[in-house]
């Protein structure tokens, strides 16, 4: 088993069977995590890139079974931040030393194209890198956002198991998801994708396929999050009995680092929700990015993808200091650069 890890470290490649055996054997976990940490250090160094997350609107037209923001969750109070408010939050983030904004929202048309372009242009003027995470759009829209100054785009594939995908995301098409990712690549965005770990009926084999998919599309960023059931969704009773999702998500992340050594990998907020030390553990198992939330607390609490969200009572300045201290406590440092992927040609 250790040989598989040694080999992956050398060639940055594994086949499906090898990934499945790593995911099913828990005796090698520490060896896997420490090797992913070494690969991280060798290829992307000790700097941690911070990305300031703005949750612009929780209005969503989709109905993903796992998500608290799904359209049919009528118990969720909805909001939409104004363009000026978003630009203000970006300015505050810049003042706190952030170099990148991640603008996220549910999938909807509550921001017109012109409104989006206005927001993008103004964030661009602040000399901040901008990542969008606003769902499936048309090629023309992706093109316009890019022209206005958006640099990166996050769109998780969620799962590469097409049948599971379409069960979890009724009304959505797996092919269209793939097509969006392909368009984003063609438009020269830095492209982020990723998956959920612990969905009902999700097999280990399909998680292995997810990792191979990340490699096949040469993703620039990969976010992996444990699934956390939300009370007001159809998946409320899917309990993670033995608390396996955290560790399994960490393993999927560590193997992703072995196979894609030079990419950006966040220590996801959902990991911290399941483990009070989750982000630091992830940073020591292959991750090199953290995305602190800079949205006002009154809105943060309404952006409830899953329950138990962290930092609901902490403001942006508190989180900035807290996270810096945590990063320094493990002998890493906060990066002062934009943190683009520095692609290595093998
Ligand atoms: N648990 C964990 N992550 C979730 N997401 C949505 N719902 C949940 C949940 N219940 C993730 C999806 C989406 C991202 C914005 O949030 O992967 O891409
Ligand atoms: Fe909407 Fe995204 Fe939640 Fe799906 S995961 S319901 S698209 S916010
Ligand atoms: Fe928000 Fe620690 S990151 S309080």
Image (cartoon, grey):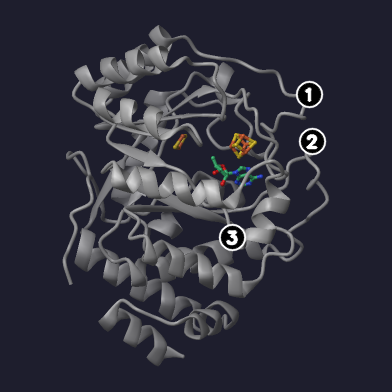
Is disc 3 surrounded by few (<14), some (14 to 19) or many (20+) residues within 10 Å?
A: many
Tell me: is circle 2 under 8 Å from ligand 1.
Answer: no
Q: Nearer the viewer, mark 2 or mark 3?
A: 2
Query: Taking the image as drawn, is residue 22 in sight?
Result: yes
Q: Which of marks 3 and 1 is in front?
A: 1
Q: Residue at x 41, y 62 (%)?
A: 214
The image shows residue 142 at horizontal and vertical percentages of: 37, 32
Q: In this view, does 89 lie above or below 67?
A: above
The mark nearer the N terminus, 1 or 2, is 1
The mark nearer the N terminus, 2 or 3, is 2
Q: How far apart are marks 1 and 2 (CA)?
A: 8 Å
Quick check: 82 left or right of 52?
A: right
Callout 3: helix, strand or loop? helix
Quick check: 255 left or right of 109?
A: left
Residue at which label 1 appears: 75
Circle 1/circle 2 CB separation < 8 Å? yes
Q: Residue at x 45, y 59 (%)?
A: 281
Q: Between residue 137 and residue 302, name the one nearer to us.
A: 137
Q: How far apart are marks 3 and 1 (CA)?
A: 28 Å
Quick check: 28 left or right of 130?
A: right
Q: Distance between the residues labelled 2 and 3?
A: 22 Å
Residue at which label 2 appears: 232
Query: Taking the image as drawn, is residue 285 in sight?
Result: no
Circle 2/circle 3 CB separation < 8 Å? no
């Amino acid at each position: 088993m250790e040989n598989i890890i040694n080999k992956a470290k050398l060639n940055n490649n594994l086949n499906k069977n090898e990934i499945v055996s790593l995911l099913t054997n828990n005796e090698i976990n520490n060896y896997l995590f420490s090797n992913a940490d070494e690969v991280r250090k060798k290829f992307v160094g000790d700097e941690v890139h911070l990305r300031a997350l703005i949750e612009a609107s929780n209005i969503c037209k989709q109905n993903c079974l796992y998500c608290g923001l799904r359209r049919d969750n009528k118990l969720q109070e909805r909001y939409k931040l104004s363009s000026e408010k978003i630009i203000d939050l970006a300015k505050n983030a810049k003042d706190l030393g952030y170099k990148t904004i991640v603008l996220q929202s549910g999938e909807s048309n509550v921001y017109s194209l012109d409104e989006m372009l206005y927001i993008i242009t103004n964030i661009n003027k602040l000399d901040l890198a901008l990542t969008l995470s606003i769902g499936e759009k048309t090629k023309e829209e992706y093109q316009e956002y890019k022209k206005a100054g958006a640099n990166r785009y996050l769109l998780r594939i969620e799962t590469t198991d097409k049948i599971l995908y379409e069960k979890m995301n009724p009304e959505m098409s797996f092919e269209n998801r793939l097509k969006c990712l392909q368009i984003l690549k063609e438009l020269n965005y830095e492209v982020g994708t990723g998956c959920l770990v612990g969905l009902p009926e999700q097999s280990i084999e399909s998680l292995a396929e997810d990792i191979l998919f990340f490699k096949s599309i040469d993703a620039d960023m990969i976010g992996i999050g444990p699934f956390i059931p939300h009370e007001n969704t159809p998946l409320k009773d899917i309990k993670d009995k033995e608390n396996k999702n955290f560790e399994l998500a960490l393993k999927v992340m560590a193997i992703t680092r072995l196979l894609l050594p030079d990419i950006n990998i966040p220590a996801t907020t959902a990991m911290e929700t399941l483990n009070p030390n989750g982000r630091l553990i992830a940073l020591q198992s292959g991750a090199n990015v953290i995305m602190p939330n800079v949205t006002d607390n009154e809105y943060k609490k309404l952006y409830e993808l899953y329950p138990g969200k962290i930092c609901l009572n902490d403001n942006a300045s508190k989180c900035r200091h807290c996270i810096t201290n945590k990063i320094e406590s493990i002998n890493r440092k906060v990066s002062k650069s934009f943190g683009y992927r520095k692609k290595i040609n093998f």
